[in-house]
């Protein structure tokens, strides 16, 4: 899977949760931005009017998906598999959840 494809999976699952928990209007406004970098590519979520926030950083060389500590700062303690294991996670919550509920490396 490419980083762009991953970003679309994250966006679709975030939109579905927003529509269920809040409103379809809020879900429709949600967007994703992919920002390439030398070592990591950032995946940001948000809206045009409300701004974007960092969500994930993908290590370009390995495809490992990490959460962030602060914008542009990778959190290596929050590892969510790789681009090859995206289907094993649910990306619609604040923190991704491992499908099937199994904990991996302290993350669900």
Image: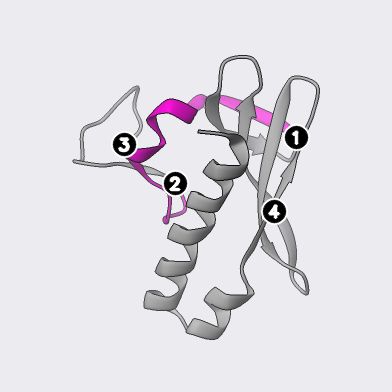
Q: Is disc 3 in contact with disc 2, using a CB cutoff of under 8 Å?
A: no
Q: Give the Cα separation between the discs numbered 2 and 1.
A: 17 Å
Q: Quadrant of residue 105?
A: top left
> x%, y% of residue 5?
55, 43
Q: Give the Cα separation between the discs numbered 4 and 2.
A: 14 Å
Q: Secondary structure at mark 3?
A: helix
How crowded pointer 4 is (Cα within 10 Å; few <14, some 14-19, many 20+) is rated as some
Q: Is disc 4 in contact with disc 3, using a CB cutoff of under 8 Å?
A: no
Q: Earlier in the sequence, mark 4 or mark 3?
A: 4
Q: Is disc 4 in contact with disc 2, using a CB cutoff of under 8 Å?
A: no
Q: Furthest residue to the top? A: 61
The circle drawn on residue 88 is: 3
Q: Quadrant of residue 69?
A: top right
Residue 82 inside the magenta-drawn segment: yes
How crowded pointer 1 is (Cα within 10 Å; few <14, some 14-19, many 20+) is rated as some
Dot in front, 3 or 2: 3
Q: Quadrant of residue 85?
A: top left
Residue at the disc numbered 4: 53
Q: Secondary structure at mark 1?
A: loop
Residue appearing at x 53%, y 74% in the figure: 27
> x%, y% of residue 11?
54, 57
Dot in front, 4 or 3: 3
Q: Is residue 29 above or below residue 5?
A: below
Name the side, left or right, on which 28 lies relative to 84.
right
Q: Earlier in the sequence, mark 1 or mark 4?
A: 4
Residue at the disc numbered 1: 72
Where does the magenta region start and end?
Answer: 72-94
> x%, y% of residue 8?
55, 52
Q: Give the Cα separation between the discs numbered 1 and 3.
A: 25 Å
């Amino acid at each position: 899977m490419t980083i762009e494809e991953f970003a679309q999976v994250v966006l679709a699952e975030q939109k579905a949760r927003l529509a269920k928990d809040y409103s379809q209007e809020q879900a429709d406004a949600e967007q994703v931005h992919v920002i390439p970098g030398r070592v990591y590519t950032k995946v940001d979520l948000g809206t045009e009017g409300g701004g974007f926030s960092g969500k994930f950083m993908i290590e370009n060389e390995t495809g490992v998906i990490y959460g962030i500590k602060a914008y542009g700062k990778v959190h290596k303690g929050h590892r969510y598999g790789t681009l090859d294991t995206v289907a094993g996670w649910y990306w619609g919550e604040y923190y991704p959840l491992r499908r099937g509920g199994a904990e991996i490396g302290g993350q669900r």
